Every structure is written in C-alpha cells, then in structure tokens.
C-alpha cells in the first residue's frame, strides 16, 4: 500500500510539474556558442565585480522581471525542496537565479540563499552564498561571493560577516566556509539539470 501511495504521489508531481517545453524557466534567452576567452584580461576581476554589483542593485530596486518556482534539487547524496527565483533583464535573458534553502540540518537551524549570476551566454561568473544564523545569542549575516572566469576557474572571493546592527563579527566564532555540498554549476543549463518536478509559483 505504501509503495502504491508513493507511485501515485510521483505521478501527481509529474503531471503538475512545469514541463520543459511549456516552462519559461527553460527558456533562458542566452546567446549560443560562447567561445572561451583566451586573451588575458588584466581588469577581469573589476569587470566581474561591477557586473555583480549592477545585478545586485537591480534586484534590490525591483528593476528586473522575476519568476518564482518550486523544485526538488538533486545533488549527490541529498535531495531538498528548493524555492527558486530567476531574474531577467530587458532583453529576456536570465541573469541570476536564487535558491532558498532552509533548515537542511535539523540540529542547526539556518537559512541559506545561494545566488548564481550569469553572463549573456549563460555562463556562471559569480556564486553568492548568504547565510542567516545565530551567534552569541544574536543574528549573524554572512555573505561569501566567489568569482569565476569563462573557464569556470575561481579567481576571487569576497567575504563579509555582520551582526544585526552592521557590526563586523569574528569569523572564527561565528563564520563558516563556502558550502560546496549545496552544489556549484558552471552554467545555467547545467544548473537546471539538478532540478526535478519544477512547479511555477503564483
């Protein structure tokens, strides 16, 4: 009986899932056939950081078209139900995707927002992990941003750890490292392949 219930539940999920040909999530709007950059760019880190800052500001100022989804994310040894938000620019290209992951460890409550930033070809140029937790009986807000070149090689990292009043906290007592177990994907298509049973949210 239990097996039958599980099979019926899976069938319902498939029926109500957002299918590839009907779901806007799979229409990225990105340009095709990007060539890898082989010419050294002395100011690459500055350029990527500028792109990151511009997109982050547009997110805050609600200047982008947003879509919301719910999906099961498969990554190695675990599966988690994940809320997704994607943002599109004026020419309909997906330029960021946020994953909201809450209380994945039952004995250590926390919330992580992992955000992918994409270039016009859908390549990941930055991944941001923002973690809200509790430290010394107060809130702690940690942000780690990793920057990647066109070959998806890590080239720079930004880090901040702040308290509720904006005070700088001690990483040794309150911080943590970038959590790669959440998965890192080099491009938008690769990231989509980690999701199953995608459903649009109102």
Image (cartoon, grey):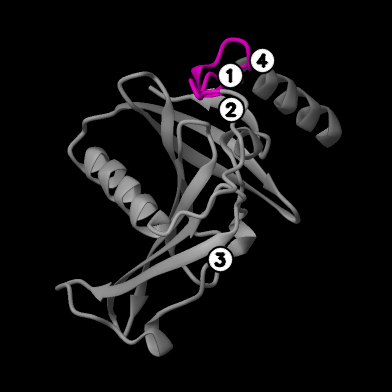
**Marking on residue 15:** 4
Q: In the rendered structure, are the residues bearing label 1 and label 2 in contact, judged by CB atoms less than 8 Å apart?
A: yes
Quadrant assignment, res 61: top left
Q: In the rendered structure, are the residues bearing label 4 and label 1 in contact, judged by CB atoms less than 8 Å apart?
A: no
Whole-angstrom CA distance, mark 4 to mark 1, is 8 Å
Quadrant assignment, res 106: bottom right
Whole-angstrom CA distance, mark 4 to mark 2, is 11 Å
- Residue segment shown in magenta: 18-31
Which x, y percent locates residue 131?
A: 40, 63
Which x, y percent locates residue 58?
A: 23, 38
Residue named by callout 2: 198
Q: Is residue 28 magenta?
A: yes
Residue at the image position 57 percent from the left and 35 percent from the top:
188
Whole-angstrom CA distance, mark 1 to mark 2, is 5 Å
Which badge, 2 or 3, comes first in the chain's sequence?
A: 3
**Marking on residue 18:** 1
In front: label 2 or label 3: 3
Q: In the rendered structure, are the residues bearing label 1 and label 3 in contact, judged by CB atoms less than 8 Å apart?
A: no
Residue named by callout 3: 179
In front: label 4 or label 2: 2
């Amino acid at each position: 009986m239990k097996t039958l219930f599980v099979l019926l539940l899976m069938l319902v999920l498939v029926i109500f899932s957002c299918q590839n040909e009907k779901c806007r999530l799979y229409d990225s709007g990105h340009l095709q056939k990007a060539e890898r950059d082989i010419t050294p760019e002395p100011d690459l880190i500055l350029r990527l950081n500028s792109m990151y800052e511009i997109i982050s500001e547009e997110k805050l100022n609600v200047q982008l078209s947003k879509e919301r989804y719910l999906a099961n994310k498969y990554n190695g040894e675990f599966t988690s139900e994940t809320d997704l938000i994607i943002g599109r620019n004026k020419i309909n290209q997906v330029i960021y995707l946020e994953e909201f992951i809450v209380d994945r460890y039952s004995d250590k409550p926390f919330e992580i927002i992992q955000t992918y930033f994409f270039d016009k070809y859908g390549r990941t140029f930055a991944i941001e992990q923002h973690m809200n937790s509790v430290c010394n009986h107060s809130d702690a807000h940690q942000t780690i941003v990793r920057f990647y070149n066109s070959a998806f090689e890590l080239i720079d990292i930004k880090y901040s750890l702040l308290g509720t009043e904006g005070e700088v906290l001690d990483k040794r007592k309150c911080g943590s490292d970038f959590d790669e177990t959440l998965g890192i994907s080099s491009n938008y298509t690769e990231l989509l392949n980690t999701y199953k049973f995608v459903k649009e949210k109102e």
